[in-house]
Image (cartoon, rainbow, N blue to C red):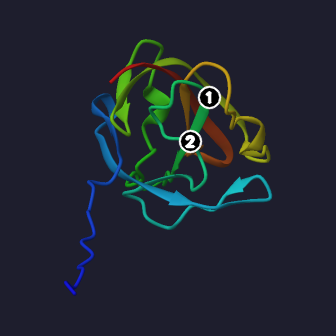
Amino acid sequence: MVGLTTVQATAAPERLIIPKVGVNAPIVRVPVVGGKLMIGNSVDAVYRPRRDDPLCDPLGTSIIAGHTYRSGDGVADNWRNLRAGDTFRAGGCRFKVQYTVVRSGKFRIGHLMRADGPPRVVLIGCKPDDYSRRIMVFARKVGR
């Protein structure tokens, strides 16, 4: 009998790349509990729901969250500077910003996550000068 060896393939991690604001961050999968994304402590990584569809899926909305810090070393510090028409890459696909809004930090992301509708990503980070508010960048998939 010939012995079998299991070889574990290691794929490159998903990344969020936003040249306009200097972001090139690994995307880490985390759980959603009570409608809140359980993001980690890293200021250099971004987070998305563990059970979310692939970012390049042809339908639905995905969420990516990152930290901001008043000291200026958070991955999401400059997301507020993204405007309609700006582009970025996430998970191997290209996205174009549709609009950016500021909302209360008390909302739950569950209503944003959808398996239907146009393919898009919502970037979410705290407002650097007011952690009780959230910067939300809505972007539609425009290609690979």
Q: Amino acid at mark 2?
A: Asp
- Compared to residue 88, the image places residue 134 above or below, namely below
Q: Amino acid at mark 1?
A: Gly
What residue is pinned by disc 1? 60
Q: Earlier in the sequence, mark 1 or mark 2?
A: 2
Q: For the C terminus, which image quadrant?
A: top left
Q: For the N terminus, which image quadrant?
A: bottom left
Q: Which mark is residue 53?
A: 2
Question: Which SS class for mark 1?
Answer: loop
Residue shown at 61%/53% (left/top)? Answer: 51
- Compared to residue 64, the image places residue 41 above or below, namely below
Question: Which SS class for mark 2?
Answer: loop
Q: Residues within 10 Å of mark 1 (few under 14, many from 20)?
A: many
Q: Position of residue 91 (x, y in %)?
A: 38, 40
114 relative position to 19: left or right: right
Q: Position of residue 42 (x, y in %)?
A: 43, 64
Compare residues 37 and 141 and report the one nearer the observer.
Answer: 141
Looking at the image, do the residues carrying marks 1 and 2 touch, with CB atoms under 8 Å apart?
Answer: yes
Compare residues 72 and 91 and report the one nearer the observer.
Answer: 91
45 relative position to 124: left or right: left
Q: Residues within 10 Å of mark 2 (few under 14, many from 20)?
A: some
Q: Quadrant of residue 115?
A: top right
